[in-house]
Image (cartoon, helix red, strand yellow):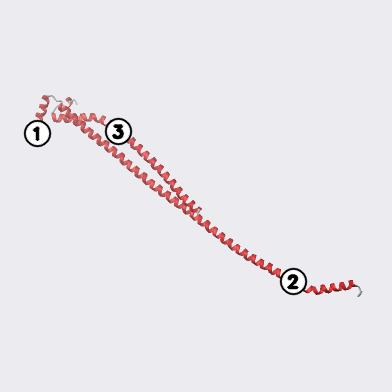
Amino acid sequence: MRQKNQASQIIAEAKESALKESEKLIKATEDKIQQEIKNTEERISKEKNLAIAELNDQLKDSASTFLSKITSFDKGNIKI
Amino acid sequence: MFEDPKFWLLVSFILFVILMIKPFKSMLIGGLDQKIEEIKSKINSSLQSFSGAEAKLKEAQKQTEDLDNKIQELLTSAKSQAETISKNIVGKTAQTISSKEKSSLERIKQIETSAIQSIKNQASIELNSMITNYLVNLSIADKNKVLGKSVSDFKSIN
């Protein structure tokens, strides 16, 4: 009877220990993923702002080209 | 000598001793035989008891050995089960982590795609706004020029 209890205890302890380790690992992974997503969002936001700032000149140029075509005004005279 | 009572007393004693030797001897021998039989019986009984005890001891030793083996089997089985359970949990954990990592990569990709789409939309809005503002703010003369050109272009197409 005592040995049966001991055997059950071995199984229960192993299960509990494995579950605890598993929970720890999953929690650590979740935290890592959350941090990774947060970092990505921040990086994307910065890159997005930078891209929009860099795009502004190109947009002005595209708008000038387009307006020059539809108005026949000289592109250099179009001030946006 | 024959008249001496001591002589007759001695003779009587010797006769008594001679007469008593046989029954005493048989009594003594009979008692000894009985004693020997008793001792033999006791020895046999003791031997039987000893054999019985020895057999019981062997049986008990065998039972103990069997019990030890069963305990060992039980513990080995328990350890094996524990190992299997641990392995299963480790496997499931690895799957969960892999799944979470995969979904996080998809989420990151989604964020990037969404950001690119957002930049495209913003650029489109910005471009429209630039063109509209420029056209709205044209002088009347320039507006007429543009309108004239548009009509001319339209006619040339048709």
Instruction: Tell me the number on the disc at residue A45.
Output: 3
For the record, the magenta segment spans A45-49
- Does residue B4 belong to the magenta stretch? no
- Work out whether mark 2 precedes mark 1 in sequence or the reverse, and give the earlier one: 2
Q: In this view, does B22 lie to the left or right of A18?
A: right
Which residue in the structure is indicated by mark 1? B154
Q: In this view, does B64 lie to the left or right of A64?
A: right
Count the numbered circles shown.
3
Which residue in the structure is indicated by mark 2? B29
Q: What residue type is labelled 2?
A: Ile
C-alpha span from label 2 to label 1 = 160 Å
User: Counting other residues with Cα less than 10 Å from the Cα at mark 3, is it few (<14), some (14-19), or many (20 or more)?
Assistant: some
The residue lying toward the viewer, choosing from B153 and A26, is A26
**Mark 1 chain:** B
Q: Is residue B124 left or right of residue A27?
A: left
Q: What residue type is labelled 3?
A: Ser
C-alpha span from label 1 to label 3 = 44 Å
**Image quadrant assignment for residue B51:** bottom right
User: Counting other residues with Cα less than 10 Å from the Cα at mark 1, is it few (<14), some (14-19), or many (20 or more)?
Assistant: few
Question: In the image, residue B56 lies at what x, y percent?
Answer: 58, 62
Q: Is residue B90 left or right of residue B149?
A: right
Q: Tell me the element at label 1.
A: helix
- Give the position of the N terminus of chain B as an image quadrant: bottom right
Question: In the image, residue A17 lies at what x, y percent?
Answer: 44, 46
Question: In the image, residue B12 lies at what x, y percent?
Answer: 85, 73
**Mark 2 chain:** B
Give the residue displayed 14% in from the left and 30% down from the top.
A70
* B64, above or below A27, in the image: below
- Give the position of the C terminus of chain B as an image quadrant: top left
